[in-house]
Image (tube, helix red, strand yellow):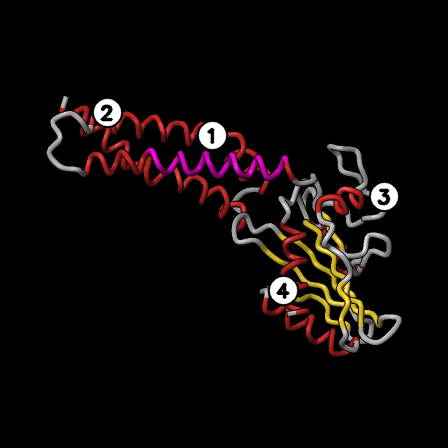
Amino acid sequence: MLKFKSFVQFIARLAVVLVPLWFVVAALGSKFGLWSWKFGLGKMIFQWGAPVMLAGLVIGILALIVAFIKPRKSGGFVLAALAIAIPVAGMAKATGTKALAAELPFIHDVTTDTQDVPSFSGDLIKLRAGTDGVNTADYIGKKDTREKELVSVLQARAYPDIRPIISADAPALAFEKSIDAVKALGWDIGTEYREGGMIEATDTTFWFGFKDDIVIRIRPSEGVGSVIDIRSLSRVGGSDLGKNAERIRDFRDRVTG
């Protein structure tokens, strides 16, 4: 019986390390090109992630049971608690993400101007074209494949605060403040066109290395000051889980703060 207890605790130690490591490897493997994001996210996370967490939970419960066999130290109970807590936390995270996805629109393209949408340069369009499964850069007429509604309608309903940024600064100063905001947010700048009031940048996520492209347009307002528009578009994926709207808000707060 003691040999069985030692074996279970050994497996539990492995589970404590391997369960979280599975998800780290899935994300970073995609980021560094060891496999595609479709395999890392679609297979390793969405398809196989639940069985991995369930297996870890079963091992943790078994470790808790055997910890009562001739308990001498508290180490067995601590190990069991860790082995249980890790998959439970993972399941809670997955449930929260699923709930968030159900609450938000299934879109990946957000802009402050849905009528006169800021456009990406030809160079960036070509760069995007090299990505497998890339999302189209068209906005006008684009529909959500799930709800069959216009993206602009879904965006207005979910993110009514995403509107053109009105600045009292002249376009030249608004451009500089926009550049400073982009740098502060850690985005990689691709285009700085001062005469045309255009900035392009790319934001890369830590996990999976997903790239979202941003275009910023600065124009004189009808009176004094400027109008700043920004568009954020994910290169791949159906739902951005609100990330593009969040990114626009972060930029807005930097520019107006």
Residue highlighted by disc 1: 50
Tell me the number on the disc at residue 141.
3
Residue at the limit of the structure toward the right, as seen here: 222
Residue highlighted by disc 2: 65
Residue 89 as seen in the image, left or right of residue 117: left
Task: Name which residue type carries label 3.
Answer: Gly
Camera-nearest label, 2 or 1: 2
Q: Is mark 3 in CB contact (under 8 Å) with mark 2?
A: no
Residue 228 in which image quadrant: bottom right
Residue 89 as seen in the image, left or right of residue 211: left
**Quarter placement of the C terminus:** bottom right
Q: Please report whichever mark, 2 or 4, sits nearer to the chain's N-terminal start.
A: 2
- The residue drawn where x is 81% and y is 43% is 142
229 versus 5 height, above or below? below
196 versus 94 height, above or below? below
Indicate the position of residue 173 as horizontal and vertical percent values. 74, 78
- How far, Cα to Cα, is label 2 from label 4? 52 Å
- How far, Cα to Cα, is label 3 from label 4? 29 Å
Q: Is mark 3 in CB contact (under 8 Å) with mark 4?
A: no
Task: Name which residue type carries label 1.
Answer: Ala
Label 4, residues with CA under 10 Å away: few <14, some 14-19, many ≥20:
some
Residue highlighted by disc 4: 188
Residue 218 as seen in the image, left or right of residue 253: right
* Range shown magenta: 84-102
Main secondary structure found in the magenta portion:
helix
Label 2, residues with CA under 10 Å away: few <14, some 14-19, many ≥20:
some
Q: Please report whichever mark, 2 or 1, sits nearer to the chain's N-terminal start.
A: 1
Q: Is mark 1 in CB contact (under 8 Å) with mark 3?
A: no
Task: Name which residue type carries label 2.
Answer: Ile
Q: Please report whichever mark, 3 or 4, sits nearer to the chain's N-terminal start.
A: 3
Camera-nearest label, 2 or 4: 2
- The residue drawn where x is 19% and y is 24% is 4
